[in-house]
């Protein structure tokens, strides 16, 4: 009885906090009216920065030139495999290609959210509430505006997760391998089958990742692959406010940077932050050994913490995990996470001109949100009841 009372109090606190967070998000939306939806609908390709970079690479591919030296404002840090996958869009005019890409992205997102809800037999009311809040979340809307890759990565993760639930380990491995091939910073997710001794999944994932990478390198060009690797080797933990990773927060708080006032100049904190991120991955992998149900999503969150770059929009990858929390009765924590994802990027407009340490701490909000996602998913990791023995084998 006492435990139930404590749980009721905890849930009441979390739901109250979620309501206040939603009120804050709504106030920001009203105060800075017309921001994100205008960015999606605008004809100005410079606003769709990531897609503009992808489209230019695709166009250069068809014209036989360097796909990583396109003159775009942003660098294309995605591998040649991604250039190959979207190459057909390079045959269209940029704005037409962008709008087509947005339509595909929406179709993919609705598809994998519905797939997860159906797989979990999630109550229709929760499926609608969770799905709508995720589709209207700040990370998702910003992803559409910029034209980013994350929903396609989320689809691959969902395919791997559902295939694992159905003991289709080869399919699960192929899906995981393709995700890692497209976004190598997510390589810690391979620990999900490894620590549970899903050897077929591990081997298939490694093989699929290597084969997909080689296909991209052969078709797009080995020179392009070397250029991509050089770009990756030169990238570091950006201190930009939208970067929610631990190393980025250390760079923002403890090094000289153009984005915020530092607390102190302690550059050694950046490698310490990487170490803390690795520790988070290790702790998550240890917890995942007996918990396949939430384990993948907890490892995705840990991967984002340790990565040098994990934009706030990467939270799109954790949406299916939140639906899983709803299905497993973690309603209050899930509602809080959904509410936190509603906070728009206009949050920065309240702080970025102040030049104070307090403002820098406020600008680091998206790290706090990512850590909370990780903690909730980490504590939710447990062996689900009723898992058939055939799903526990290698």
Image: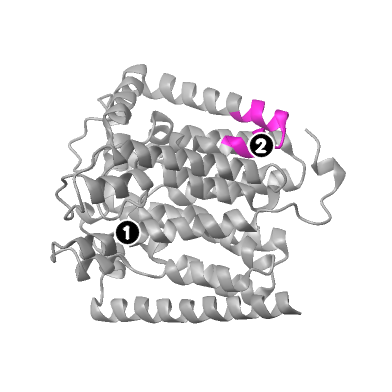
Taking 254 as reference, is 18 left or right?
right
Coordinates of residue 290 in the picture (x, y in percent): 72, 45
Image vertical order of residue 181 relative to residue 376, above or below: above
The answer to whether residue 112 of the structure is visible from this angle is: no
Give the residue at x 31% y 40%: 270
Label 1 and label 2: CA atoms lie apart by 34 Å
Q: Image quadrant for the N terminus?
A: bottom right
Q: Which residues are magenta?
A: 190-205
> Which label sits in the foreground, 1 or 2?
2
Q: Which residue is mark 1?
A: 145
Residue at the image position 65 percent from the left and 33 percent from the top: 194
What mark, if any, has residue 240 been given in the picture?
none
Looking at this view, is 363 or 31 the one in front? Answer: 363
| Residue that numbered label 2 is attached to | 193
- Is 229 positioned to the left or the right of 85 in the image? left
* Furthest residue in direction right, as rendered: 389
Q: In the figure, 16 relative to 98: above or below?
A: below
On screen, residue 380 versus residue 17, left or right, reads right
């Amino acid at each position: 009885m006492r435990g139930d009372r404590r749980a009721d109090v905890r849930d009441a606190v979390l739901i109250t906090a979620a309501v206040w967070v939603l009120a804050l998000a709504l106030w920001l939306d009203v105060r800075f009216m017309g921001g994100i939806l205008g960015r999606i609908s605008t004809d100005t390709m410079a606003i769709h920065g990531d897609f503009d970079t992808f489209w230019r690479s695709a166009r250069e591919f068809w014209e036989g030139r360097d796909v990583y030296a396109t003159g775009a404002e942003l660098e294309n840090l995605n591998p040649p495999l991604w250039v190959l996958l979207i190459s057909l869009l390079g045959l269209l005019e940029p704005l037409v290609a962008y709008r087509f890409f947005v339509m595909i992205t929406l179709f993919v997102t609705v598809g994998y959210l519905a797939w997860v809800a159906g797989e979990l037999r999630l109550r229709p009311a929760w499926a609608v509430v969770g799905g709508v809040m995720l589709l209207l979340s700040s990370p998702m809307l910003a992803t559409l505006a910029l034209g980013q890759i994350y929903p396609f990565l989320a689809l691959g993760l969902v395919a791997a997760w559902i295939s694992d639930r159905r003991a289709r380990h080869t399919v699960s491995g192929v899906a995981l391998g393709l995700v890692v091939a497209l976004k190598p910073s997510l390589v810690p997710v391979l620990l999900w089958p490894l620590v549970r001794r899903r050897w077929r999944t591990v081997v298939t994932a490694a093989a699929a990742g290597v084969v997909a990478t080689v296909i991209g390198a052969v078709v797009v060009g080995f020179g392009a692959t070397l250029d991509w690797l050089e770009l990756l080797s030169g990238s570091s933990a950006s201190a930009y406010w939208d970067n929610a990773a631990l190393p980025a927060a250390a760079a923002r708080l403890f090094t000289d940077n153009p984005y915020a006032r530092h607390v102190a100049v302690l550059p050694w904190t950046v490698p310490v932050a990487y170490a803390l991120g690795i520790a988070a991955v290790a702790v998550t992998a240890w917890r995942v050994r007996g918990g396949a149900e939430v384990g993948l999503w907890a490892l995705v969150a840990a991967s984002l913490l340790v990565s040098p770059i994990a934009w706030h929009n990467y939270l799109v990858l954790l949406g299916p995990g939140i639906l899983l929390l709803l299905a497993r009765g973690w309603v209050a924590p899930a509602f809080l996470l959904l509410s936190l994802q509603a906070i728009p990027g206009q949050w920065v407009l309240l702080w970025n001109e102040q030049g104070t340490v307090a403002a820098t701490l406020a600008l680091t909000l998206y790290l706090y949100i990512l850590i909370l996602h990780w903690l909730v998913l980490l504590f939710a990791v447990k062996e689900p009841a009723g898992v058939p023995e055939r799903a526990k084998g290698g």
